[in-house]
Amino acid sequence: MGEVVSTHSGLPPSFYSLGIPTGLSFIFCQGKNYHYVPLLKTWKNAQMYCRNHYVDLATIDSKAENLLLYDWLMNSTSVAHIWIGLYRGINNFKWSNGDAVLYTSWCEGCINEFECTRLDPTGWWLTENCSLQLEFICYMTETWNKLPRAEWWL
């Protein structure tokens, strides 16, 4: 199975989409492998699943990454809403892996009283009740399996 350059949304050729025969799929984007997980879980349980099998829930650092994930999900799955790794901390939003928030894609009125974030069918992000069960996206990096497990969350 070879790499196929994404031709959707006018994205640059540095973005690749790959399929896995098991029915699960992933996208490679700027050093991260995004993995769509078709299981219904609360945000916290999705985070635990991602941390046990990958690195964490997806982080999105640019408009190009957001467009790629949105376009891929809309063309590859029947999913309407998925968890990503953004959540509301005490004073601001944070990525669950601790990375700085470099980019957001909120629509007007999409930030409400809820603390967890989902990607919706229009590509916008919305806060949502964390106990809702949604499918989700995890990510893995090229160096993920090279680190001893004890060092992952130091």
Image: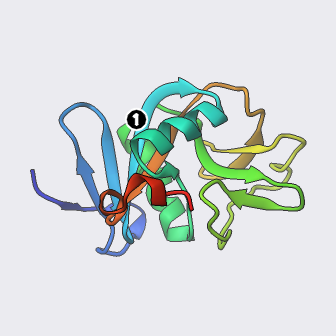
Please state the horizontal and vertical placement of residue 142, each as a whole percent of the image: 31, 65
| Residue in view at x 30 percent, y 62 percent | 146
In the image, is 4 to the left or to the right of 24? left
Amino acid at circle 1? Thr
> Total of numbered circles in the picture?
1
Looking at the rendering, in which quadrant would you find the C terminus?
bottom right
Residue linked to disc 1: 77
How far across and down, in percent of the image, does residue 107 sit? 76, 55
| Image spot of residue 149 (x, y percent) | 41, 52
Quadrant assignment, res 7: bottom left
Going 73% across and 33% down the picture, which residue do you hit? 130
Judge from the rendering whether residue 26 lies leftward or rightward of residue 66; answer left or right: left
Q: Which residue is drawn at 47% across and 47% down?
A: 138
Residue toward you, 80 or 140? 140
Quadrant of the rendered structure where residue 40 is? top right
Q: Can residue 13 be seen in this view?
A: yes
